[in-house]
Image: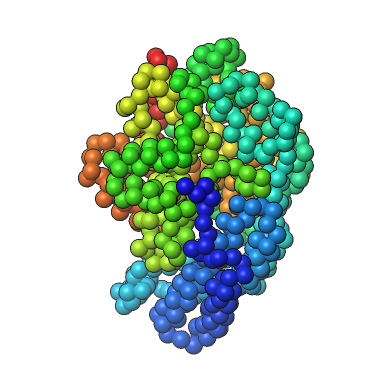
Amino acid sequence: MNTEWSLNEIYKGFDAPSYEADFGKLEDAMKKEKELVKKADTMELKSAVEQLIAVEEEIAKHIGNLSVYIGLVQAADTENGDAMAQQNRLMKLWSEGSATQAAAQKIYARIPDIDAMAKESDLIQEYSFMLKQAKKQAEHLLSDEVEEMIAAMDITGGSAWGNLFSYLTSTVKVDYQGKEITLSEVRNLAYSPDAKVRKEAYEAEIASYEKIQDSIAFALNNIKNQFAMICEKKGYASPLDMTLEQSRMSRKTLDAMMTAIQEYLPVFHKYMRKKAEMLGYSNGLPWYELFAPMGKSDTQYSLEEAKECLVNNFQKFSPDMADMMKEAFENQWIDFYPRKGKEGGAFCAGVPSIKQSRILTNYDGYFGSIRTLAHELGHAYHNVQVQTQRVLNQDYPMPVAETASTFNETHLIKAALKEATNEEKLNLLENSLMEHTQVIVDIYSRYLFETAVFEQCQNKFLMAEDCKKIMEEAQKKAYGDGLDSNYLHPYMWACKSHYYSSGLSFYNFPYAFGGLFALGLYSKFEEEGADFVPKYKAMLHATPVCTVEEAAAMEGIDLTTPDFWRQSLSQIEELVEEFCKL
């Protein structure tokens, strides 16, 4: 089995004729859009809209291929100078079209009655949701020239700071036991069955951030200040309001979820205190023991064993899911192991043009890595469901983006628990609670941290020490007495890429949303069995063309009151009680 992904199905390199040809096609399509915008006032509105949509489909197809290829090359090798140059080339071209794109959005906003026009055009009917969103967002568009300037300045502004973060965290040398290893490798050691290894790895990780903390603090300040400034200029009340609109999610839903999370924090604290007690600590868990395995936990899995575990378990849910997983392992969709220059963490990127996905992980052989694969393959399955949508209707918002992935995790754990011995069950329960704690408690701390950063960076430059203090305060509030306050992780802001996107903020609460929404959906699967699967697939298919509340309503779920969220959290409480008994 190949352990690195293949990108040849997209392009065979930056010097491939097809790569340059697509760049040329993108330039031609963007010129055509510019010409259409200029003469739109002299055209019948329906015809102008139809022609703009058609050319935007061409643009989306080519920029999708180019951007995903560049991003994947760079993720696997952040020191690749050609990838950096190509990214700047693409961003420059894209920024030059920002004024045209803003003008096109304003043309869509001029449609007096989208539903009425949709009755006269099948194309407009298919894109009616997108057009309604464009009409809504047009209220926040600046002049075409200013939109173009923002996009151009971002190349050497927020996006450049984000690239610096990726470069620093992927290349920093971590001094561990007399040798130099990567940040991804040392962070993986947090799951080691050896307590001494976990503690020493934590200390080495913390020490490594001191080498790059100031540069990353500069990146964080400048990205957040840029985002806040743009939000203000566009007329949003706050960065969070802009994020919620981008997420197609109401503040009422976010408040309902956060209310339930705050109510259930003591449940998570109880779990952590019990784990600390079992590991011999009396003052809560030190951070370096958050991921300490318990029960029978020394089992390591080869890639073949990981594939077999996933394919066999998901065959019981849906054969097409299992087939996709098998294809992913066998046809080089996945880049498995950590190495110097490769990004840390894990992600899944859809490649619509070849109807596949590509997945990056940093596989260490433990069950947690199989769970990560299940998570990322859930994203890939979501991508499969939206492939039959038209090209501009394939992007789904952040909150539901984490639903299929977390649903997969839930299925894997529940299946494993049914077959486990008591000792294995303890390990699986603990592993599940560890992940739930990350998705709920740690995500809540990240939400608190980002909220505080936005509030404070407007009035002062946040040095590394300031960022550390804000993070520690957020962790104390979220983790409570479950953590030993003498051993927190003050650098969690310096290792999470979610903070360093110039166009996206608050990529934290969607994980909690996805986790709890998936638990609610899984309860329905347990009640309905095979009858649930086609409805689930239909919901995933619809996510790009509806709000998150509308997607949930397809399954009979109301997200705007705390009750649904409490019901999902109560399932985690049951796991905590079972864990404490074992």
Looking at the image, residue 314 lies above or below residue 277: below
Q: Where does the image place residue 467, in percent across and percent down from the top left? A: 71, 37
Report the front residue among 66 and 253. 66
Is residue 252 among what the camera can see?
no
Residue 534: % across, % down = 26, 50
Please name the residue shown 70% across and 45% down the image.
171
Is 83 placed left or right of 566 in the picture?
A: right
* Residue 379 visible to an observer of this rendering: yes
Note whether 571 is above or below 294 in the view shown: below
Q: How is the image coloured?
A: rainbow
Of residue 572 and residue 232, the one placed in the foreground of this image is 572
Instruction: Depth check: give the residue in front, 197 or 520.
Output: 197
Using the image as rendered, state which of residue 377 and residue 454 is in the foreground: 377
Q: Quadrant of the C terminus?
A: top left
Q: Position of residue 8 (x, y in %)?
A: 52, 62
Q: Residue at x 63, y 47 (%)?
A: 342
Apparent side of residue 529 relative to residue 446 in the rendered image (left or right): left
Residue 327 drawn at (x, y percent): 39, 52
Number of dots carrying numbers: 0
Q: Residue shown at 33%/32% (left/top)? A: 415
Q: Residue at x 49, y 63 (%)?
A: 9
**What residue occupies the far bottom of the structure in this picture?**
42
Q: Is residue 159 above or below residue 441?
A: below
